[in-house]
Image (cartoon, rainbow, N blue to C red):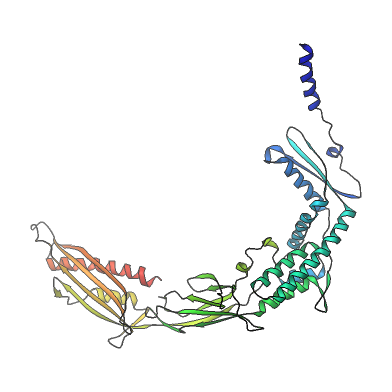
C-alpha cells in the first residue's frame, strides 16, 4: 500500500521540477543569429504561448535595420507620406515573408508567465531576402505588363499589387528592364500609376445648365468615362460625385456612362457639382490598405445656375362661405417663399392655388360657451407649362374658438391653418 502511494508522488515531483533554460536568465550571444525572447503574463492573454512567440519575433525584427532607398524616399515624399511609417510597413511585411526562416528554439512557462525563444540565422536571412527580392521583381513586372496590355479598372489594382510585392525590399534599388528601357522598379510603379490616372477622362454634361427653383424638378449630370489615350469607353470605373446635399460613388456602366439625378433644389444660390475618380472605392477590396500607393485624382466640376421661378397666386379664402376681406393664407405663403421666387400677376412659371373656407358644426351651447368654427384648406402647386400638379397639401377640421362671434372663431381657425400650412411647406419644400 505504501509503495502504491509513493509512485504518484514521485511522478508529480518530477513533473514540477523541469530545468529552467539558460536563455531565461542569460541573453543568447551567438553572433550568427538575431535572438528574440518574448515573455507574457498568463493572466493577460487568452493564448499566452502564441503571444510570447509574437513578442519574440518582434524582438528579432527590431534588430534588423531597414534603410529606405533614395528612390523609395522620393516616392514617399511626393505622396506626402511618412518615412517612419514606411519603414515600419516595410519591416512588418518583411517579417511576414521571413516567418519560415525563423527557428523556434523553445518555450518555457511558470505558474504566472510564458516565455518563447526564437532566432534567425543572419546568413539564411540574407540568402532568403535575395531570393524573395528576385521573385518579387518578377511578379511585379508581370503585374505591370498585364496592367499595360489590358487597360481598365484592373490596371489600377494590378499596379497596387506590384507595389505591395516590392515594398518589403525597399532598402536597396531594384533595377529592371521594361520594354527596352532601364528603370528603378519603385519609380516605374509610381510612374505607371500616374500614367493610368492621367488616361482616365471623365466628362460631365448637364441636361439643363440653369434650374428654376421648384419648377425644374428633373435635372441630371451625365458623365462619360473614356480612355484619353485611345478613346475607348471604360466600364466599371468608380466616380465620386459631390453636390451640396449629397456625396456618392457611382460606377460607369458598360457604355462608360453614369447618370446622377440632381436633387430638387430649394436654395436660391447657384452651386457646383464636383466629380473625380474615386480612388478609395477603386482599392477598397485590396489587402494591406495601409500600404497602398496613394493617388491624387484630378477633380472636375460643373456649375448649375439657379434662378427664381415666376410665381402667381390664385386664392379663394372664405370664412363661413364669405370671401375674406383680408386673405390670411396667401400673405403667409408669400412671406415664406419671398426670398426664393418672384411673385407676379401673370405669365408665371408656377401657380399656387389656395382654396379655403370655414363652417359651423353646431350652435353655441350658451352665453358662457365660446363659438366654434372649423376650417378646411387646400394648397396646390401647379407647373404652368405642363399643367402638372407637383405638390399639394390638404388640412381639414381645424377648430377655432372665440367668445365674440362665429366669424371671429373662423379667423381663429384660419390662424391655426396658416401655422400648419407654413410648417408643412417648410418641411416638404423649403428645407430640401
User: Where the C terminus falls, by quadrant?
Assistant: bottom left
Residue 111 in the image: above or below residue 240: above
Looking at this view, is 337 or 2 the one in front? 2
- Across and down, in percent, residue 168 comes to 78, 61
Residue 315 in the image: above or below residue 107: below
The quarter holding residue 40 reads top right
User: Where the N terminus falls, by quadrant?
Assistant: top right
Residue drawn 9% across the image and 60% down it: 364
Taking the view exactly as shown, the residue that stands out farthest to the right is 31
The quarter holding residue 428 reads bottom left
Residue drawn 13% across the image and 73% down it: 321
Direction from residue 368 to residue 260 in the image, left or right? right
- Across and down, in percent, residue 379 comes to 27, 73
Asked if residue 67 shows in the view, the reply is: no
Residue drawn 63% across the image and 70% down it: 279
Residue drawn 75% across the image and 43% down it: 52
The quarter holding residue 389 reads bottom left
Taking the view exactly as shown, the residue that stands out farthest to the bottom is 347
Amino acid at each position: 500500500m505504501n509503495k502504491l502511494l509513493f509512485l504518484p508522488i514521485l511522478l508529480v515531483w518530477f513533473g514540477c521540477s523541469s530545468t529552467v533554460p539558460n536563455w531565461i536568465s542569460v541573453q543568447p550571444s551567438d553572433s550568427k543569429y538575431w535572438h528574440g525572447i518574448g515573455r507574457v503574463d498568463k493572466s493577460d492573454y487568452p493564448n499566452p504561448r502564441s503571444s510570447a512567440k509574437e513578442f519574440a519575433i518582434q524582438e528579432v525584427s527590431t534588430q534588423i535595420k531597414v534603410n529606405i532607398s533614395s528612390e523609395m524616399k522620393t516616392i514617399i515624399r511626393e505622396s506626402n507620406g511618412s518615412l517612419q511609417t514606411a519603414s515600419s510597413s516595410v519591416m512588418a511585411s518583411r517579417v511576414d515573408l521571413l516567418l519560415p526562416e525563423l527557428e523556434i528554439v523553445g518555450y518555457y512557462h511558470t505558474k504566472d508567465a510564458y516565455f518563447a525563444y526564437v532566432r534567425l540565422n543572419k546568413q539564411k536571412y540574407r540568402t532568403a531576402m535575395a531570393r524573395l527580392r528576385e521573385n518579387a521583381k518578377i511578379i511585379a513586372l508581370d503585374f505591370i505588363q498585364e496592367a499595360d496590355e489590358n487597360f481598365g479598372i484592373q490596371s489600377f489594382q494590378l499596379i497596387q499589387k506590384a507595389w505591395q510585392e516590392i515594398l518589403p525590399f525597399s532598402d536597396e534599388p531594384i533595377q529592371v528592364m521594361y520594354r527596352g528601357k532601364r528603370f528603378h522598379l519603385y519609380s516605374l510603379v509610381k510612374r505607371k500609376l500616374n500614367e493610368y490616372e492621367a488616361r482616365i477622362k471623365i466628362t460631365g454634361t448637364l441636361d439643363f445648365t440653369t434650374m428654376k427653383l421648384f419648377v425644374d424638378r428633373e435635372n441630371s449630370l451625365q458623365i462619360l468615362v473614356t480612355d484619353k489615350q485611345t478613346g475607348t469607353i471604360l466600364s466599371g470605373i468608380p466616380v465620386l460625385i459631390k453636390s451640396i446635399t449629397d456625396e456618392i460613388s457611382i460606377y460607369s456602366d458598360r457604355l462608360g456612362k453614369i447618370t446622377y439625378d440632381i436633387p430638387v433644389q430649394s436654395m436660391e444660390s447657384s452651386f457646383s457639382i464636383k466629380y473625380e475618380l474615386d480612388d478609395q472605392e477603386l482599392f477598397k477590396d485590396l489587402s494591406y490598405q495601409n500600404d497602398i500607393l496613394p493617388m491624387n485624382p484630378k477633380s472636375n466640376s460643373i456649375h448649375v445656375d439657379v434662378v427664381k421661378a415666376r410665381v402667381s397666386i390664385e386664392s379663394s379664402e372664405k370664412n363661413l362661405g364669405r370671401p375674406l376681406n383680408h386673405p390670411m393664407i396667401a400673405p403667409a405663403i408669400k412671406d415664406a417663399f419671398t426670398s426664393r421666387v418672384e411673385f407676379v400677376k401673370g405669365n408665371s412659371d408656377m401657380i399656387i392655388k389656395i382654396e379655403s373656407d370655414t363652417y359651423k358644426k353646431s350652435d353655441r351651447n350658451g352665453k358662457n360657451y365660446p363659438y366654434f368654427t372649423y376650417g378646411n384648406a387646400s394648397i396646390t402647386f401647379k407647373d404652368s407649362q405642363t399643367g402638372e400638379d407637383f405638390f399639394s397639401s390638404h388640412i381639414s377640421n381645424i377648430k377655432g374658438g372665440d367668445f365674440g362671434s362665429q366669424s371671429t372663431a373662423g379667423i381663429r381657425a384660419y390662424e391655426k391653418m396658416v401655422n400648419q400650412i407654413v410648417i408643412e411647406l417648410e418641411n416638404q419644400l423649403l428645407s430640401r
